[in-house]
Image (spheres, coloured by chain):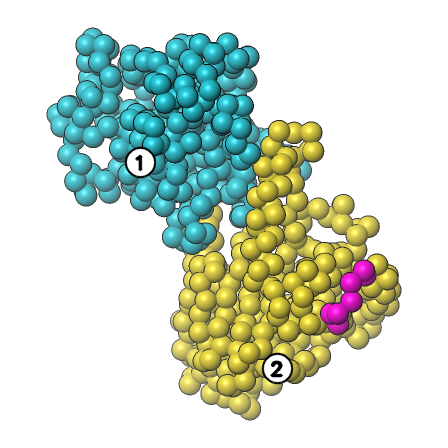
Amino acid sequence: MTVHMDEGFHRRLSAMVESMPAFPESVHQIMSMTADINCSPRDLVKVIESDPVMTMKILKLVNSAFFALSRNVASVQHALVYLGLNTVKNLAISIATVDSLPRKSIPELPMSAFLTHSLATATMAQRLAKDFLHLRDVSDHFVAGLLHDFGKAVFVQFEPTTYARVLNEAREKQSPLPQIEMERMGITCAEAGAMLAESWQLPPTLIDSIRTHVDCNEDSSDMTLTVAAANTVVKAMNLGDSGNPYVGDFQDFMRKRLGSDLEGVIAKTDALSDEVHNMQSMVQ
Amino acid sequence: MKLRFWGVRGSIPSPGAKTVRYGGNTTCLEVWTDDGELIILDAGTGIFPLAQTLLEKMPVHAYIFNTHSHWDHIQGLPFFIPLFVPGNRVSIYGASDPVSGNSIEEILQVQLQYRFFPIRESELNAQIEYISLREGESVSIGNALVTPVLMNHPVVNFGYRIDNAGKSLFFTGDHEPSYNIYEPEDDEYAMYQTLIEQKDGSILDRVRGVDVLVADASYTESEYPAKKGWGHGTFDTCIQMAEKAKVSQLFLTHHEPTRDDEALEAVFRESLKKRTVRGCEIELAREGMLVEW
């Protein structure tokens, strides 16, 4: 079966995401935290930004034409400063309690392994931005890492049978997943995620990193670079599962821009798996 | 431009002998532009006495701008008499609610329900229109330009800047300056501080140079720590905003409902003692007060 990338598909995909379930533990955490009038804003941010579905839905709302905030809200913290704590808190509650579809799960890409991969890539992208590129504001790199594979979660939820076949084929052939996605579905998860992010008017740099992290090159933005490199590091460290059997290595330009090779980054990566485990325990 | 205060009290009407000088009605400001358009900022209980003065001017076209949907800013709306009289036009502007997705229409609809009010929306005889605003997008009212600016409150709150014939006014609605949710030793502290500075900067840019600023000064500095996060400013934060934005005249409003006239004047005097910069006239907003410039 080939999914055609027509306008109807795009609309259906976008509408389906509305009913996508947030992760169960983050829903539970949001409900119990917000029952306390003095709930800590820091803790609230932590839970929201550990859940790709909740983060995506909040960024979608804040950046939508509804607000016209010049489409540049790239992190949960940024949303908090713009909309205020109580509004973000109530958005999270409404996302947590909205009638969502039951979560689909396929053994080819269990959501727990997907979440580990997303959180590890988010944490790693932020660390690369801070410690290797020496950038000041790195929270949007976390978000870019968290959402880089959002298209996969959408495929698993809405095209589980087709996507299971695609994942199996990539595994059997040991081929890069985007190639099989193109052959069998006519669209990569990166493109699907980017299209959704685009229709929700997320910041252009975030859309670009979702779309092009699979094809990072020397002209790529810092954000695309940190996400692509983090993706490789996390796969090499065997943290979670992205469904893509192809691990790869840093390319020359990556080594040059980061000032380190893959082994060098891994050697400096202390306690990544503990940090990811802590975050994961909050949402799942 | 003419500005008259009809309600300067925060949260809940507070009538009585001890608040009679400054007044007990909740937020409502009447603005007449130089080309004769009527702009009403918020529809707290102060809109009822304002409505009485409009009876002789009918038919009227009132442009009501709602800063936010909290009760003390909408409660007088069903008592805005021109709504009931054919020939009047009432245009209601404000923000949509991001959580429910509901438009500004809800601020009237929700009040005109059988159980809470005897008249239904369909029984109102004026021509009514609702316009949901987007932050930063100005609307023209005659020759005046009204610009909504996203402030900080527990619900979406638009401050409004009105520019008309070279004169200008900014009303904050309810506003608490954003504060850092992280501790200085946290990794995220500096990043969050940068976001706050950007937001404060964009608000200051909109307030900059206005002739008149009307700002939410609910609390004193000593009261504030217990009220942090409630969405209101202090005497000091309002004065600082006015000074930074080089405003000519500042009116402090949203008086705390338990503060009587004497206490209000006392805390105001105290806050003035701390001023370091001069150049801006500061007064407490008072019900009935007319400002013309």
Label 2 to label 1, Cα distance in Å?
Answer: 51 Å
The residue furthest left is: A1
A4 versus B241 height, above or below: above
| Quadrant housing the C terminus of chain B | bottom right
Query: What residue is at 50 percent from the left and 18 percent from the top?
Result: A276
Residue denoted by label 2: B2
Q: Which residues are magenta?
A: B275-281
Disc 1 marks a residue whose amino acid type is Ala
Chain A palette colour: cyan
Q: Which mark is residue A194?
A: 1
Q: Nearer the viewer, residue A101 or A208?
A: A208
| Quadrant housing the N terminus of chain B | bottom right
- Residue B260 in view in this figure: no
B234 versus A232 height, above or below: below
Question: Left or right: where does residue A105 sit relative to residue B274?
Answer: left
Question: Dividing the picture into quarters, in which one does residue B129 lie?
Answer: bottom left
A9 versus B276 height, above or below: above
Q: Nearer the viewer, residue A45 or B56?
A: A45
Tell us which disc is closer to us: 2 or 1.
Answer: 1
Q: Position of residue A17 (x, y in %)?
A: 33, 36
Q: Chain of mark 1?
A: A
Query: What residue is at 69 percent from the left and 33 percent from the top?
Result: B183
State which chain is coloured yellow. Answer: B
